[in-house]
Amino acid sequence: MIAPVSAEQSGTAGTSAKATKTYGSNLANASMMGGYATSQQYFQLESYWNVEAVDLYLDYKATPLMQDEWSSVTLLLNGKPFHSFRPEVNDQEKQQLKVNVPLEFLQEGSNLLTVQGNIQTLKPGSELICWAADTKNSWLQLFDSSRIAVQYDTKPLEGTIRDFNVHFRGLDTVNDGKNAVVVPTNSDPAELEAAMYALSGLAKANPLKQNVIPLLELGSAGVKSKSAIVVVALYDHLTDDIKKLIKREDMQNKALLQVVQLGNTSALVITSDDAELLVRAGRLAANQSLLQQLDRSSKLVDATTEVETPAVEISKNVKLTESGDQLKGARHREQVYFVSMPGNRSIADASKINLNFRYAKNLDFDRSMVTVYINETPIGSKKLSMEMADRDHMALQVPKNLNIFGNFSVKIAFDLEMTNPGCIEEQDQMPWAFVDKESMLQLHTRDRADLLLDNYPYPFVRDGSYNGVAVVLPKDRDAYLYQSLANVFNLLGQFAQTNTGNIQFYSEEAGEKELSSKQIIAIGSYENNRVIQSNNEFLYFQFDPSSKGFHSNEKMSIDIDYGKRVGALQLINSPYDDRNGMLAVTGYNPEFYYLASQLVASEGLLWKVYGDGVLTDKDGAVRPFRFKEAAAPESPSIISDIMDRSDVLSFMVILVLVLLFVLVSLILMIRKYRSKRGRVE
């Protein structure tokens, strides 16, 4: 993985003047162990960049036992070698190498940088023809201070919705915080609902998941500094400068998506006179597949316009590779596949991997094997053989105790060992293994329904869709509130695989009638949100009615002043329907419930959030607690096991049908026999 660093003279989506900009990406740490080792990392180039130069700054440290004359490192881009060097070894902590990357090897989108190391620690004697390779002390460390610097200028804006979408979620735009979703001050519930659908879809497409796309008020100072914004508003709530650019007569019984230019800011305006159609247009903006098809500046949406994304398949057969994958070279070689699964789902019994593969016949079959891993945990291995080289197969059950939920990885690792490896010159194409496209993961899943932050974003996102979410807003709205909403829905949007779920917004006046069937997110303080105040007794960290801050409970002693300087996340059973949940994002004032919302702003922070109640302060301390008692594990019934396994269920249905057929046949035979006997008599 390659992470972004700050760009210099960074480009913006709304800037028309051409100027050279630099976008930097840091490489991840990598440890290359063994005499022959490889590290692969990807970096991205946006389609609207005119790339002028790419420089690689490689920070590394090699084993001090390395033999200089017999060791080397080769750099490859998209499989093509472009530079080789002999690593330096001295007393410094690390070395740096700067290399110009050839532009002709680059490609739009994803690019693969490969570092191949041949690190030898033994020097052959002059009388020897070959020698044994030493791998224990051979290593090369790549540091995360290594980076790729791309110098580029941006192509002119095309003015289409598709092109706007590409710029809005571009690496440089997101990294520099130059994009935002914008709503009117004191937005209507429909405007916020449509905006959250749009924000969710854009957050899912965001290449830098840790960077939150902000939610701003229309007309606020922060909007002017952005280069790409999505404006969601009923027509009457648009500013005059936007209204001048839109033809209202085109919107009769319709909603409109239109790209306009506001000074140096490019804007996608989503508007309508009808609240329901505005929400429908917001769902379209959450459908990346549709946005990528709109090669025009505007799109009208009516009640019949298809905007929904396809439904998510839960239990399914997952192909590991569409066309097959080849692994080249000797020794340890890996291929990793990523499998998408809703966050509330875990792998159930009867899930298995069917791996079809083939490999070269010039291996040392006494030492060659293939191993399958799930999330770096090995689940099975098989020894390779000459007889099966052209068509080998391995079927593995996924162990019950892996406790895998949400997205996960499947790694296929081949150990391709050669006979007398020290006497054979290393060749990139020899030996090889190939994973066939018939390789399949038969995936069965279970719902994880425990009301704990360990399972977040459940219950608000279930099976890839919003699960009837109700957001209760505080009495007073400010920038902290809008950014709290942005934090919450940036992360929820990354888990929402469809745009078909429901989000509704309510004022603090909402009661049981509105909230009884909902999964509730209540944001605010004791004073400015009546839903939080009226349900204070159900909170784990309760407010002191006199000080308005949190007070001590059975888990933690809280000083009266400290209780005013912390934010809290609390996931409780809904006070209006205990089958549902309520997430209280709370604090003494807006600054501190915004602080609490930051804990659920990106997936990278979720490891800090578990249990059902979490306190955080401005010093960065995060204190998670579990208040609900752990329920005794229930043994699944035979019926539930059968219902969870489609293969067994199908077998049972067929068995019942066969038994019915046999029973009917017996009855007919008996009747026939009796009728014959009656005629004889």
Image (cartoon, rainbow, N blue to C red):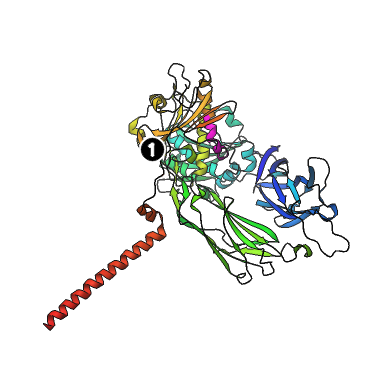
On screen, residue 360 above or below 537: below
Instruction: Quickly name the residue at label 1.
Output: 580
Q: Residue 634 occupies which quadrant of the picture?
A: top left
Which quarter of the figure is the C terminus placed in? bottom left
Q: Which sits in the foreground, 356 or 511?
A: 356
The quarter of the displayed image where residue 120 is located: bottom right
Q: Nearer the viewer, residue 95 or 472?
A: 95
**Residue 375, how many percent across, how many down?**
57, 50
Q: Residue 523 at x, y = what percent?
A: 46, 29
Mark 1 Cα-neighbour bin, 10 Å: few <14, some 14–19, many ≥20: many
At which x and y percent is residue 330? 70, 61
**Left or right of 242, for residue 28:** right
Identified at 38% across, 61% down, the residue is 650
Write down the region rendered in magenta: 596-609
Q: In this rendering, does residue 334 appear at all? A: yes
Q: Residue furthest left?
A: 681
Residue 13 shows in the view:
no
Residue 181 drawn in magenta: no
Q: Residue at x 25, y 72 (%)?
A: 665
* Amino acid type of the residue that numbered disc 1 sits on in the rendered structure: Asn
Task: Examine the residues drawn in magenta and state their main secondary structure.
Answer: helix
Question: 147 above or below 219?
Answer: below
Q: Is residue 616 left or right of residue 105?
A: left
For the point 45% across and 35% down, the residue is: 191
**Is residue 246 placed above or below 646 in the rendered structure?**
above
Q: Secondary structure at mark 1?
A: strand
